[in-house]
Image (cartoon, rainbow, N blue to C red):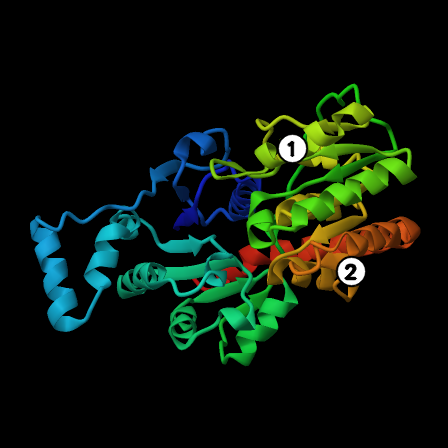
Amino acid sequence: MKILLFFHGGSKNRGCEAIIRTAVQLLRTNPKITKIALATGDPESDRHLSGIDVLHLDQNSKIDKYSLGGLLNAIHIKFLKDESYAFRKIHESIIKLIPQYDIFLSIGGDNYCYGEQPGIYEIDRQIKKAGKKLVLWGASIGAEDLSPQKIEDLKSFDLILARETLTQKVLEKAGLENVKLVADGAFLLEKKELPLPKAWSAGKTVGFNFSPLVFKKNSKSKAAAFALLLHILETTDFTVCLVPHVIIPGNNDHEILQEFHKKFHDSGRVFLLPSDLDATEYKGYIAKMKFFIGARTHATIAAYSSGIPTMVLGYSVKSKGIAKDIFGEEKLVLDLSEISDAGKLIAKFEEMISEEVTLRETLQLRIPEIRKKAKKAIDYVIKIV
């Protein structure tokens, strides 16, 4: 069997890198899988990943309105009210690969959280039209994200692997019968330990991750986060390690964390990790922390899976669902609307400190079970073929 993983933007998003690394790791456990390829928007960022046989550039094409294709597209839209030709042309870098592979793993589990996706629907239609198997790997979808068109597309999948129970329940309630519950593969990510920075304080280092995405969605959140770090510095002897996890132009954690570093640099207790570490190296540092506070879901998964008490600056169903599956509740997860309230951030931080022992015990108990769920993904994929 030949498998293509697609809808991967590149490994400058370390969470996406973690998903690819662990998906390939699971797929390689089955000898029936003879080829694994990755369609990526940034092949250079993925060349260091092992276990992948071929990297395909996934790049949207443009339609020249004065070309034959442009004329055909105009006719389809004007007379047939049909945009499918345009979407097939735009996404031809993926569609042209369909004859080469047997199973298609759509690894953009978040893609269905961002409104209608007619281009994605057209790719899925072409895959199924060719008689190939289609899997949604690690999905997170809220009830508010669903529409009749989206549900119709999701029903075309041979298998949907939901990474938390909130998504599983939403999809099953919508009438989907192709859903299986797993866990995010990033819970299986290995760590790589590097020398600790000079500023590191053993047993007293708190990790902090913030993202431009959160700031764009709640413009007052950065000021509240500043207040939280000031509280940590004034009321504890902890050192704060700023951890970037997505390094994409226009959505770069390292750039916004430089503002935090500059603001608190004089304290001598706040330092920033470099932007060029890979997912396993960031996890190596996170695994040695006392606590972790993070906006990026996969940075928090690196902490959870290392047994580190974690506070989540959540903005989606995946953050809430993952916490609920670990703790039985949305433990220490703040909603997007709450993270601009400095008082709530500080209260949650104090709650994390006061419940440290219980949180560590729960993680020690639950993470092995979560990892077992993550490993089930490969079994479900093999069953559909």
Identify which residue is drawn at 56% across, 57% down: 377
Q: Which residue occupies the foreground of this view, 310 or 77?
A: 77
Q: Secondary structure at mark 1?
A: helix
Left or right side of 356 for 327? left
Q: Residues within 10 Å of mark 2 (few under 14, many from 20)?
A: some
Q: Residue furthest top?
A: 198
Answer yes or no: is residue 378 visible.
yes
Q: Quadrant of residue 288?
A: top right
Of the 4 image quadrants, the one containing the C terminus is bottom left
- In percent of width and height, residue 68 lies at 7, 51
- In percent of width and height, residue 298 lies at 63, 46
Q: Nearer the viewer, mark 2 or mark 1?
A: 1
Q: Secondary structure at mark 2?
A: loop
- Residue labelled with disc 1: 259
Q: Residues within 10 Å of mark 1 (few under 14, many from 20)?
A: few
Left or right side of 45 for 209? right
Q: Is residue 341 above or below residue 60?
A: below
Q: Quadrant of residue 133?
A: bottom left
| N-terminal label among 2 and 1 | 1
Residue 331, label in figure: 2
Identify which residue is drawn at 10% across, 64% down: 75
Answer yes or no: is residue 382 visible.
no
Left or right side of 237 for 218? left
Residue 343, label in figure: none
Identify which residue is drawn at 45% across, 60% down: 135
Residue type (three-letter) at the residue carrying disc 1: Glu
Residue type (three-letter) at the residue carrying disc 2: Lys
* Measured Cα–Cα span from mark 2 to mark 1: 28 Å
- In percent of width and height, residue 18 lies at 58, 42
- In percent of width and height, residue 247 lies at 53, 35
Left or right side of 102 for 138? right
